[in-house]
Amino acid sequence: MSAAAGVEVVNFGCRLNIAEGEAVRAAALRAGAADTIVFNSCAVTDEAVRQARQAVRRALRERPGADVVVTGCAAELEAQRFADMGARVVSNDAKGATESYEASLPEPFAPSPSKGAYTPALSGADHARAFLGVQTGCSHDCTFCATVLARGAARSATVDAVLAAARSALDRGQREIVLTGVDLASYGDDSGTSLAALVEALLALPVERLRLSSLDPDRVDDALFALLTEEARVMPHVHLSLQAGDDMVLTRMKRRHRRADAVRLVERLKAARPAIAIGADLIAGFPTEDDTMFANSLALIDDADIVFGHIFPYSPRAGTPAARMPQVGRSVARERAATLRTANARRRHAWLDAQAGGAASVLVERDGLTGHGENFAALTLAASAAPGSVVRVRLIARDGERMIAERIAA
C-alpha cells in the first residue's frame, strides 16, 4: 500500500458499499482528514471479514503515521477486534457523518447516531455508471445472514432524496444508474411506497439506462414485473436472491420462496421479454445439505437459466441460527461451490456464443475499451470509444468471458 497524504477509501463487498464509499470520502474531506485510510468492510462471508482484517493489519504496518479507520459490516460485527489492532472504528450509520473523521474524536470508536431515514448513497464520477444506494438493512431473518446484525432493520431513503441524487449523477454525465440496497425489493416498506413506484419516478427523469441490483423473487409484484419486462430503459438483466435450489434447504434458510416459484418467475420474465439475462446468488454447502439437495441447486442453473451466478461456499457467521446447525464441512462447501461455478460458466459461455452476430448498446467503461451491454454481457471493443458513452456495436465472437464487439457506424 503506497503512502498518500489525502483520504483513501477502500471498499469491500457489495455495490451498496461502493456507493456509500463516496459518502465516506466526502465526510472525511469535510472533516479535514489527512493521511487517512478508511476501510469500508463487508461481512457477507468469513472470507470477506478475513480480507478486511488482513488489509487493516497491512495498513497499520506500512503506514504507521496514518489514521486507519474501519467501517462497514465487518466493523459492526468485530468492532473491538479492529480497535484492538489499533484502528479507529466507525459504525455503518455514522460512516457518512463528518464528525466521525474529526481528528479530535476520542479513540477508538466514533459515535453512532440514532437510526433514522436512510440518506441515499451515490458513487463517484470515476465510475461509468452511477451506483445509487436507496435502502439499507433488512427486516427478514434468514438463518445464514449476519447483515441484519450489522445494518439493522430495513430503512429506505425518501423518493425525493433519491431523485435528487439521481439528478446529480445525470448532471455529471453518467448515463446509467444502478439502484442498490441490502434488500432492494423491500424499498418503501417503511414509508408506504414501493420499489416499482421509485422506478417510475426515476423514469420521469432523462435516465437512459436503469439497472436494478439483487431482488428477492417473492417481492417481484405485478407493477415491478411490468417495468422489468415492458420498459426499454430498465435494462434486461434481473439478478435474483435465490440462495439455493432445494426446498428443504430454502426452508432451513428461512427464505420466503420455493424452487418452483423461482423457476416460474424466470419463465414468466423470459416469456414476456426474451432478452432478459438472469443472475442469481447461490450458497453451496449450507448446513444439512446432502448430495440430493445439492443436485437440486446444481440443476437450478439450467432450470432458471442462470448466466450470472454469484456463487460462494457457506461459511458460518457467529450469532446466526445456521451456525448452530449441523455443518457439512468447509472442504465440501468449497468443492460444491466450484462445481456450481463450472456449470454456471458453461451456461454463460453458451449464452454469449449465441449472441455472436447480434447487436448491442454498450456503456463504455473508463478505459474506453470495455463495457457492458444492456443484458450485462461483458464486451471488449475492437477500437476505443469515449469513456462513459453509449455506443451501438456488433458482437463478433466470444473471447473467454467477454464478447469482442465492433462499433456500428452511425
Image (spheres, rainbow, N blue to C red):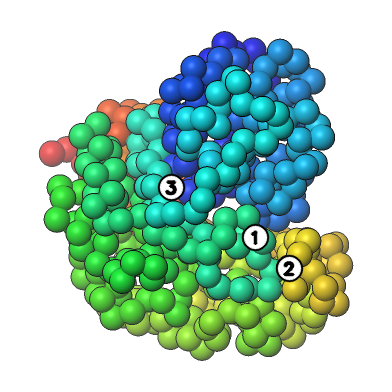
Q: What is the x, y in percent for residue 378?
A: 43, 47
Amino acid type, label 3: Ala
Q: Is label 1 in a helix, a strand or a loop? A: helix
Residue under the point 29% across and 43% down: 165
Q: Residues within 10 Å of mark 1 (few under 14, many from 20)?
A: some
Q: How far apart are the two marked residues, 3 and 1, measured between alpha carbons?
A: 34 Å
Instruction: For residue 299, say whether it is visible.
Output: no
Residue under the point 81% across and 32% down: 85
Whichever of labels 3 and 2 marks the residue nearer the N terminus, that label is 2
Q: Which quadrant of the figure has residue 174? A: top left
Amino acid type, label 1: Leu
Residue receiving disc 1:
149
Residue receiving disc 2:
320
Q: Nearer the viewer, residue 357 or 131?
A: 131
Residue receiving disc 3:
378
Q: Nearer the viewer, residue 135 or 352?
A: 135
